[in-house]
Image (tube, grey):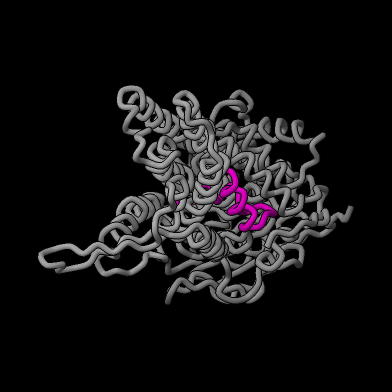
Amino acid sequence: MIDMTETQPIFGNTVPSSMAQVGIITKYTFLDYFRSRRFFVLLIITVLIGALLTALVYFRPEAFTSSSLSPYAFYSTWWGNSINFVIILSGIFFGGDAISGEFQNKTGYFGIPNPIRRSSIYVGKWVGAFIAASLMFLVFTGITVGNGLAHGSGIPFQFVESFIFAWFYLAAVLGVTFFFSSLFKSSSISILVTVILFLFVFNLLGSLVLPLIQVEPWFIITYGAGIIGNVLQVPYPQHETVLNAGPRGGFSLSTFNSTVPEGLVIIAIYFIVTAVLGLLFFERKEFT
Amino acid sequence: MVVVSNPSVEAVNLSKKFGVFVAVSNLNLKIEGSKCVGFLGPNGAGKTTTLKMFTDLIRPSSGQALINGINVHTEKKKALASVGTLIETPEIYPSLTPREGLTMIAEIRGVPASERKKRIEEAVADVRMQEWMDKRVGKFSKGMKQRICIASALLSNPSILLLDEPTTGLDPRGMSEVRDIVKSLKSKKRLIFMSSHLLSEVSDVCDEVAMIDHGKLIVYDTIPNVTAKFSGGGNAVEVGLQHAIDEALLANTIARFPDVMGAEKKDAKTLIIKFSGGLDVQERLLDDLVRLNIGVVSFKPTSSELEDAYLKLIKDTL
């Protein structure tokens, strides 16, 4: 719990409230990230993705604005296909070792033996990482909107919706990466687990295994995040599409699309559960 | 403002287990007042574990770690408000400069904004790191980081300092400077609880000593009392001479100097002199030997009463 009261002075100084201490940790975490090589590297990756898509739009505009696609085809193709990748990369870059680094790199020995709750450190670091990741997110959004405007797609309301969903998803992804970072003391293990889960396991389960056994992947965050791209399609994709395949309809394949409320709930549950668990792990973890 | 007149650090039945390994076992220790207490013990004795329990880095399995009577684990903010700490060699966020890292700690600890800059500059000056104040910490050596962390422990003007081997990683000059800092803090009415492997360091700066082995407190008393009870008797110095001296001078003069307990030849040009007392006696002894004009070319301590006591008390170590 974060208290709002100041701790009474014992020897000259009045220790600020836990909320104020969250702000202090946020400020210095962001400053550390902002000056770090990882920030610069991720900025280059984000700009490169944007530049690549810009080049594609320039040379193959029909791939983005085909009349067979929805009226928001440009945003659906550009944003719907790439923002998830940018978000996951940001989560890994800024959240992957945020807490495990406190143990492995021994930065925890500098901050924790002070009159500050561990929860203030956790929340402050999360907010600092969220601000840093949001900067990447905004850079990519800027490149997207710039291209959209340049190609006459304007800024449809559906894109604003998608933008808000994506930002919410970013918060949840950071919640998950902080959870794994809190679970493991080794930064490389926490980063590796996050990468494998988001880039391989969730995708493999959501796009191959579960459609085959016809189970709706409501428990996978990337399934919920499908609303980011789906909201840009007209009409909104059907919740379930069954495809009979193989000789004489030998087997069925189900494709699921989360509805907007369902997607928001999945993202919210991931955010809340991982935030609470991550915080609990950090509270209990020992600097041995 | 409430000022703690008699700062205290207290372990009440404090225990820590890691699986079946008992790192600290029912430790009961109360230190209070303005003094420096050395915390001694072999590797794995439980010194660092104990200090970590006083700083929320680990939780006790049972018992309480109290600072000024406040439980560190239930009221951490209040308990650590007046405590400066240095546990192991902490790392500062590498992209920050010492000024920024220390400002962060000063803000967390509630150092008033009007005093912050001055306090940081003073603390950094104490550890002789002024010229590195605005360089990024990521490029610093271990010793430089240790100095900044010592500055961090000092900057909120704490009433209690918990230091875990504070001179580790420092060059000889740095070690001497840290000892001077600790001595100066003693004169400012602070309670310093400091673990160390260096008995000479503890003898030099501490008033009392707590010895721990296998997680259990062996002894806690003033250094004179511990050495009086457990030492085989006396400190010793090895004196190198330019030329040999005769036995009569050794037996009738040198061996009868005040506080000297015995003097013998190690070889023709080397004497071993045992004496009781501290640095003052050692200084007087050197002065007396030089006055004899016997060609003293070297003078170095070989063992100390505290070392004797330590070796007697801590027999079986890991």
Q: Is residue B44 left or right of residue A160?
A: left
In front here: A70 or A13? A70
The single residue placed furthest to the front in the displayed view is A67
Name the foreground residue: A236 vs A259: A236
Q: Depth check: B204 or B140 in front?
A: B140
Q: On the rendered structure, is B141 left or right of B180? A: left
Q: Nearer the viewer, residue B55 or B188?
A: B55
**Vertical relation: A175 (above or below) B122:** below
Give the residue displayed 30% in from the left and 53% down from the top: A200
Residue at the spot x=76%, y=53% of the render?
A17
Give the image quarter of residue A30: top right
Residue B25 in the image, given as x and y percentages of width and height: 54, 75
Magenta stretch: give its range: A103-128
B203 vs B296: above or below = below
Q: Residue at x 32, y 33 (%)?
A: A63
In the rendered image, residue A243, in percent from the top left (x then y), is placed at 24, 62
Q: Residue at x 57, y 41 (%)?
A: A131
Would residue B196 appear left or right of A8 to someone viewing this image?
left
Q: Position of residue B124 (x, y in %)?
A: 66, 32
Residue A264 falls left or right of residue A239: right
**Residue A199 appears in view:** yes
Q: Quadrant of the C terminus of chain B?
A: bottom left
Q: Is residue B275 visible?
A: no
